[in-house]
Amino acid sequence: MNVIWDEPKSVVSGHKPADIVEPYEDWEQATRNPNISDGARIWKPVFVELNRGEHGDYSSSIKALVKLMIQSDKGQTIQHDPDFLPVVVNIIVGELTGENVERFTRFFLYRPEGQAYDDVPECECLHIGVGFPIANSLAAATMGVLDTVFRGAKRYARNSTSGAMPSEVRHHYVFDRPLGDKVVTGIVDDVVAVANERFRIETGDASAPFASRFEHYWQQSWDVVRNGSALEFGRSLNGADLSADMNDVVYDGTVDEVEFYRRLHANKGKRTLAVGNLMDPNFTRPVGFNSSHGTQVADLAAGCPIEEADESRPIMFVQLPQLASAETWGGRLELFILSGLIRMLRWADNWKDGNGDTRRVAVVINISYEVFADAKDGTGFLEREVGRLARQRNAEGVATAVVLPSGNGFRERCQAMMRLPRGEQDYVSWQIQPEDQSMSFIEIWLDQLNRATLTITGPGGDTADLKLTRSEYTEDDGTIVLPSYTVDRNRQITGRGNFLIARAYVRRFEDTSKTRVVLAFAPSLNHENRGQSVPVGSYKLELSNQAGAPLHAAITVQRDDTPRTFPRYARQSYLDHPGVDGVDRETEVRDMPLWSVGPVTRLGTLSAYACGSSADVYVVGGAYDRDNRSTAALYSAAGPTDGRDAPDLSAVTEETRAHGGLMTAGTYSGSASRFRGTSAAAPQVTRQVVNSIASGSHPDPDFSNHSKPQAMEDMRGSQTPSSPPDTRLGVYTLPLKAEAGRKPRREFRS
């Protein structure tokens, strides 16, 4: 392979400032199938933070931004989603009444791909996501609904909030709403069987015998539709809609679930399973499989036998698009998870009680997804925003918590750590697998960087040097090397002619003084453009510290596998080294990194979404119930990371080695399926946190405050806390209980 390492340039793909380019977004654009848009325009989600105005307020800034969007831009370069309307109302009205509006000062806007990196007036850009096509007819819509809401909020504020609040303002304003007496379970996940009897109530009414426990359901999709002046991904249904649709297909007292799902997914078009059609909006995972990740998570978190169900434990569900779930590297996933979380908090702020009154209710949200690579110190984009939203809603006086899995990467060989004194070097091999149809990424996080060199040696022996430096210096031959995190951006390896097959991204984060290097590789099997396929084999990554203090490097291969029930698409790349030569006593396979022999390690493998130390976020590991050499499940990830030492706690995800996983609800009523992984641990804790807030050991339920220490004590039972916490299991393992949401495989022991 003829390798060329390009010299530094100030931009990457198109018009992008090099110092803030997002690697995943940029590499998706660089390798994208040109036919994906099919004549539509590519837009990108831009997550921004509103700046304060001249007088330290947010109201003047949001007014200036919305005025520009309505009067000048008119949707040409800035679009919004439905969740932007509460932002406008709550900032303008809430700030005037002395409320803390910090939760609403960060939000998504949407911009054409070529202008995604342009400045947004009155805002600071925090993150730019992977693009998606929007039909030109949708993008050209007017801003009428936004204008109506904006004018109503301004008029009410101008009158010093006297008189009746206009209906368009009342619909979105949340701060004066009373607190409800419910705790809602929120779930962001894959396809869910919403008609399964585990999520239904018997009403006793012959004309409408069933009611859905899903009070809100957002079926996100790759399709973008227009909702007033806002862009909407997919469609939302409320509990009344779902209940009515179920009761329309009741025959002889039984819901015809096949017919129900046929109607629910009628707008999806013909089902396709070809890998090349993953980007097709018609691609959908049907409910024809015996199980789905979303159904299993929902059952463990909130499932209940229909004869025992009532209205006290409602559910909200955001169903992620198939493509976002299929691409496990997470670049596309972050938009949909975060927008789903924002939407669920909006639902919980506008909850209708039994009398039809609107209240704010407590909520516990389960997000059973993971990625391997990111900052791992709590500052990663999605992790930071999840913790911020939960913390700020708690500060508003409404109990809010989020539960995450610790991750399944313990034995994936995707983590390495180096500590290099001045003048020393070390290496690790990155193995790219054959027939991998997905992009591969590896992240290298450098602490205390002064001057270093990363040398990449390909399978054919070609080498390329990436010089990393914190400040400008001159080589012995007189060559001037500029700071790598300001201009070294467009370094790319080209092979097979001029096809772009890899790119390196370097960025320094001033808030943590860390430098991030991301190596992005094209698929090893690219059906759409065979020339843009990276050679298969071992890529030697050698890092040398040439100056300054000891250099610390954390190297993580990004997750890149194919989820269960999806067509085979991606193959996980991994790390190798001669030190990976120990026999694993659990699996009896010779793939265990030897202690202190080489950089590959199983420590620090926690999901990059679960490395912060937020007081309102739980991180949950997986464990065996009994009859195994070790308590921790084979896959359950380990700390420590820069952000946390261990999961908070763990839950049983494997009954025994012979009886792997847990039994949960299958797709159709009465069926069962096996579920394993830390994704099965998190929803068990979600259920218990809901119980704790609703009752726990408190004399009276406290729906205004979530206390993690109190909930941890309520869940502990007779378990003795571990001090210090186990790096894989946390302070204790949640006892395996015969909960209403769990279908026992065998009789329970006392």
Image (cartoon, grey):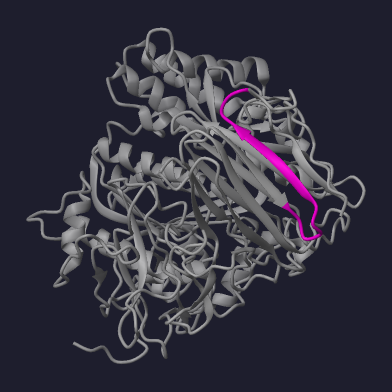
Query: Where is residue 442 shown, x and y percent of the image?
Result: 61, 52
Question: Is 38 inside the magenta-drawn segment?
Answer: no
Which residue range is magenta in the image? 457-472
Report whether 425 appears left or right of 462: left
Q: Classify residue 55 by image quadrant.
A: top left
* 376 or 291: nearer the viewer: 376
Report whether 449 appears left or right of 175: right
Which residue is drawn at the image coordinates 29% and 24% (left, top)?
99
* 316 or 707: nearer the viewer: 707
Does residue 298 appear in the picture of this structure? yes
Report whether 388 appears left or right of 747: right
Query: Where is residue 647 shown, x and y percent of the image?
Result: 33, 59
Above or below: residue 90 compared with residue 181: above
Which residue is drawn at the image coordinates 36% and 28% (left, top)?
102
Does residue 127 appear in the picture of this structure? no
Which residue is drawn at the image coordinates 90% and 45% (left, top)?
498
* 651 or 639: nearer the viewer: 639
Query: Where is residue 432 shown, x and y percent of the image?
Result: 70, 63
* 729 or 515: nearer the viewer: 515
Which residue is drawn at the image coordinates 37% and 47% (left, top)?
643
